[in-house]
Image (tube, rainbow, N blue to C red):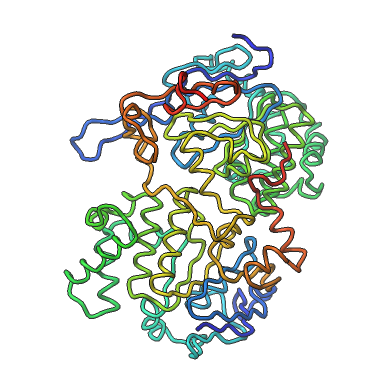
Amino acid sequence: MLDEDEIIRVEGVSKRFSCRGRGPFCPRRSLVACNDVSLALRKGETLGVAGESGCGKSTLAKMLLSMEAPTEGRILYRGRDLVGMSRGDRRRNCKNIQMVFQDSLLSFHPRKKVVDIVTEPLMNLGLIDKRDKDLRALELLDMVELPVDVLYRYPHSMSGGQIQRVGIARALSVEPEVLVCDESTSALDVSVQRNVAELLVRLQRERGTTMMFICHDVALINAIAHRLAVMYLGHIVEVTPTSMDIDKKVRHPYTKALLGSIFSVRMDFSRRIKAIESEAPSAADVPPGCPFQDRCDVVMDICKREKPTLLPLKGEADHLVACHLFGSEAAI
Amino acid sequence: MLEIEDLSVLYGRGGGTGPPAVDGFSLSVGKGEIVSLVGESGSGKTTVIRSVIGALPRSASISSGRILLNGQDVSGYSRSQWRRLRGTDLSMIFQDSGVMLNPIRTVGAQFVQYIRLHSDSTGSEAWDRAVSMLKHMRLSDPDNVMRSYPFELSGGMKQRVGISMAMTFNPDLLLADEPTSALDVTTQAQIVGQMMEMRERYGTTIVMVTHNIGVAAYMSDRMVVMKDGRIEEQGTREDILCRPRSGYTRELLEAVPEIGGARFA
């Protein structure tokens, strides 16, 4: 099972949070943020993770960063289990996996200047000397295409795009092998978003970084990622390579609905937008069987009884779908 | 229906010192039209529609221009004049209707109060009217929604409550400030569909602000592209999308990620 190219391997990871019931005397309920998630990140690839709010994308990211411990399952970085690591090991492992947040400003110390922010991980891990800080910071700013004069500025005086660039510089300062971007471009205007996305792709290519790009915009993921994983209520429902005609290749009814809900400037406006009418149930009461059964328009009896497993389609080893329509014998 | 003539808005005390947030903005919207203002943050699009409903922040002032609503100049209206107009003649949907609702009162209490404020009806009449509005927005179990507190509802449900309230008195003009930006894509598609239905059913004029150019393109008859407080380009949807004249519009359209569009990976 050990694949040289595999940097991260997520094996059957579940994360349950315990939460209060609806009334004062109701028993505690458990909310399953991630349910039996298995994924692999290969060297130098970008895996895009898409899904709606509450589907567990961010929980997955936090578990990769060891910010949350999974309830079940293993997360392997180059064969070493991150779960149950000692504090010291976990701290040293920070160097390997880094994260860029949706709103980097909130992750910066408000009284620190850019120079201190981007070199903070290096200083914390004792990788550079205090004297080299300015020089290293300049290199990092150059890398993310920021002008020299932001070095001694405070982040709150900068624009959203610049702040995200500082966040990227900080994450890449320790030259991590894996970069996790959790909605890193979502708060930006489209033109800025495009520039930041291009920057991420360029840096990733130059450095061979492995990237997990979490985003609710499937079109953006398709533009910058090699593979797309779709999550729904804590489950991975489809993993597929990205392509120009991804909208015709996806098979899971939810992925189809997700792609069908995208408003594009090049769409046919006479076509009525197809929307799934109902809303997703809360992650605290996921129905038994297929998580998507309530909103699926091709639901069958078996969907209410059995949970479908994520299986490769016949003839497409890279394309995995968790749906009874494509059960092993029925695979087309 | 709505005429905006050469509108300029300044921020800051005593007329302000910086450049105007909106500079020489003119727009004319006909009955039943859907017009969207698109542009990036800080381009002044929200300031424009806030001026139309008289809800500019205190630090802002209209320095020149007129806003005509059905031929009436409303730019100098007093608070009580505005109160008579809002809700019935024009209303607004916000980006996050959850913030507009009082967190410690039920949706029903607020909806009923809103209806009774603007019309002469009893509590139970108002309640029934509110329920029927929620039903129109295809909220399942509207009675339960009425008895819920805002935090008990999902983002999509709150947005539907916001739209129901805005549509109660069948206003001539509906202003929408990023009505779907805080929502998930599948919910966004539902809300867009329902706003289009509202227009078909009541012939409501809609002026919408959004940074989602795809949504703007799908809904609008005409589009206005704004940049730095000025109109960069305006025209019919087809003009803007297929034959953009301004370089900025072209850039903006190209930056929108598309399935089947440019890929960098």
Foreground residue, B117 or B171? B171
Residue A98 lies left or right of residue B53; in this view the side is right
Residue situated furthest top in the rendering: A1
Residue at left 39%, top 62%? B100
Residue A205 is drawn in which quadrant?
top right
Residue A130 is drawn in which quadrant?
top right
Q: Does residue A5 sit above or below A128 in this rendering?
A: above
How many labels were placed on the picture?
0
Foreground residue, B164 or B100? B164
Residue at left 82%, top 36%? A139
Q: Is residue A158 visible?
A: no
Residue at left 63%, top 25%? A97
Q: Is residue A289 visible?
A: yes
**Percent from the top left, x then y, of residue A17?**
37, 29
Q: Quadrant of the N terminus of chain A?
A: top right
**Percent from the top left, x then y, of residue B1?**
50, 84
**Percent from the top left, x then y, of residue A24?**
20, 39
Foreground residue, A312 or A117? A312
Q: Does residue A221 sit above or below B46 in this rendering?
A: above
**Percent from the top left, x then y, of residue B122?**
17, 75
Residue at left 49%, top 80%? B31
Residue A139 lies left or right of residue B191; in this view the side is right
